[in-house]
Amino acid sequence: MVILPTSIETASALTQGLPVQLINEASKAHPKPEGIKFAYGTAGLRTKANILDSTCFRIGLIGALRSKKLGGKTIGLMVTASHNPEEDNGVKMVDPRGEMLEASWEPHCTEIANATSEEELIRSLQKLITTFKIDVNADASVIFGYDTRPSCKELVQAIVDGLSAMGAHIIDAGLKTTPQLHYLVKCHNTKGTPDAYGEPTDEGYYKKLSEAYIKLVAGKGPGTPLTVDCANGVGAPALLELTKYIPKEHLDIRALRTSTNASGALNNGCGADYVKTNQCLPAGYDKEDVKAGDRMCSFDGDADRVVFYYLKGPATAKESFRLLDGDKIASLAADHLSELVKKAGVELELGCVQTAYANGNSTKYLKQRVPVTCTPTGVKYLHHAAEKFDIGVYFEANGHGTVLFSPSAQKAIKEASPSSPAAQDALEQLGALIDLINQTVGDAISDMLLVEVILRSRQWGPTEWDGAYEDLPNKILKVNVKDRSIFKTEDAERRLVSPEGLQAKIDELVGKYKDARAFVRPSGTEDCVRVYAETGLASELSALANGVAKLVADSD
Ligand code: G16
């Protein structure tokens, strides 16, 4: 007779190899601050850096367990708070294919980060182990990177302590943009396989992108200068490095806001979030010799977002500013790729993924051309929705996004027999674009190159690109509330279900304005509630946005 173990026996067998004593001892050096509640948000755990030490230590433990669960595949941990102010920090967790951590692990990360004692910490780790049936004796491999924040050094040490307590193999990738770390994770896990994504080195990353870019712009004549605001962040050294691989005739970069060592400079009056939210040039650009028609773009603090913009008049006039945000990048990429697919004569479905922040007119424009789906905010949602298409173009309005080519689409492009020289050319371009685009996550550098390639191949400047559709006037506001967790949403964050009655009040207010739309959602990266409003008439925008913000503040 076979005696099956009870679930308790199974659980204790599973957790037997957990190095409890090592974890306990190491944890004492990383005590959890009292009275603080951590939450896994839109892009991992993120808050003020000075309270993150215990969380980073524990994320190290979790990272090792995630790797053990996946048979020793390499997991990525990126220490960054991206667009947030310099005093914040956080950790993004990267799964083996370079995508964000599987969602079912998120509540466990929150629980483990909030354990108030060593005993509770061990219990919450044991719960994770038994829930996901993790072989704690399996190998673990974790690669970490970090951005330019002064707090990274100490937080990285906390992560290393967590990884060491679990006996994980540790790879220190050093200073990296977030998308570079995602790239490295995927490369490590595919190395030596038929799906090898690239060389798991910095050089491998720059070579892959630059070779594809040069192939795509070759013979298209010299380019015109592109001004890049690096947000005084890690995108600055990465961009500088990239330019070593691409001759100036192909990519003429004027890098601004590159002060990675200046205290308080990161994302301060510059960067993609500043430009998108304020709909204006980075502070001080009016003195930087920028002229009408110049192409410009801004990265965010960890270079995983990019927005473009240009001036149609003098830099000193606010109305001269024209934003080409993530929605405009999506429309440009979707149009270009659709045309190439058609020319190549391959049967592939291209679709777009947006969030509630997408400008109403961008959604209208795209829906007339391709299938469009809407997900909640967060690359983790958009990425998976985009995987459902042969070619999935996903972009958040804030400039975070990429294009995914499914394995079967890549195969179809590689193996297609062209029926004409034009089809052959389109297939070659698609093949190079597959390499140019960082398909693991939104990548400011890769997306910037993608835009440059498309504009060059169409002989377009920013004005022609901008001509696709006119944005509805729109505004994003932040409202500080006592407890943002009471704001709960449904319908891809387009409607509030709590606090009770607030959505009805918003609906009533929106109904008073022509072609208007507004929604409210709690941020998952900052301690605030965000309000988005758009109206048919620019003159009515402030009244609606401020009115909704007041309703939120009054409900607190
Ligand atoms: C992160 C996410 C993005 C999201 C942004 C803002 O970006 O990766 O998907 O749009 O946060 O999220 P929230 O409105 O919830 O604060 P990043 O660039 O800051 O890592």
Image: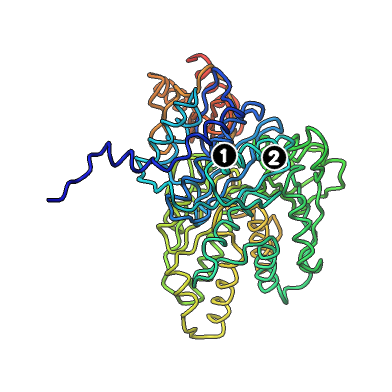
Amino acid at dot 1: Gly
Q: Is residue 347 above or below residue 552?
A: below
Q: Is residue 78 above or below residue 211?
A: above
Does any portion of residue 514 appear in the rendered image? no
Amino acid at dot 2: Val
Which residue is painted at 44% across and 40% down in the image? 18
Which residue is painted at 57% across and 62% down in the image? 187
Q: Nearer the viewer, residue 490 or 42?
A: 42
Q: Nearer the viewer, residue 346 or 261?
A: 261
Question: Residue 172: where, in percent of width, then height?
Answer: 66, 51
Q: Which mark is residue 125?
A: none
The secondary structure type at the circle numbered 1 is helix
Q: Quadrant of residue 479?
A: top right
Which residue is painted at 44% across and 44% down in the image? 375
Question: Residue 453: where, in percent of width, then height?
Answer: 66, 65
Q: Quadrant of ligand 1?
A: top right
Q: Nearer the viewer, residue 227 or 547?
A: 227
Q: Is the distance from the Cβ of mark 2 to the nearest ligand 1 atom less than 8 Å?
A: no
Mark 1 / mark 2, whichever is N-terminal: 1
- Find the distance from the CA under tag 1 to the CA under tag 2: 37 Å
Determine whether label 1 and label 2 are within 8 Å by CB: no
Residue, disc 1: 162
Question: Residue 109: where, in percent of width, then height?
Answer: 47, 35
The secondary structure type at the circle numbered 2 is helix
In the image: residue 389, left or right of residue 208: left
Question: Residue 7: where, in percent of width, then height?
Answer: 25, 39
- Mark 2 crowd level (few <14, some 14–19, many ≥20, 10 Å Cα): many
Does any portion of residue 21 appear in the rendered image? yes
Q: Nearer the viewer, residue 321 or 138?
A: 138
Q: Which mark is residue 275?
A: 2
- Mark 1 crowd level (few <14, some 14–19, many ≥20, 10 Å Cα): many
Q: Is residue 510 above or below residue 421?
A: above
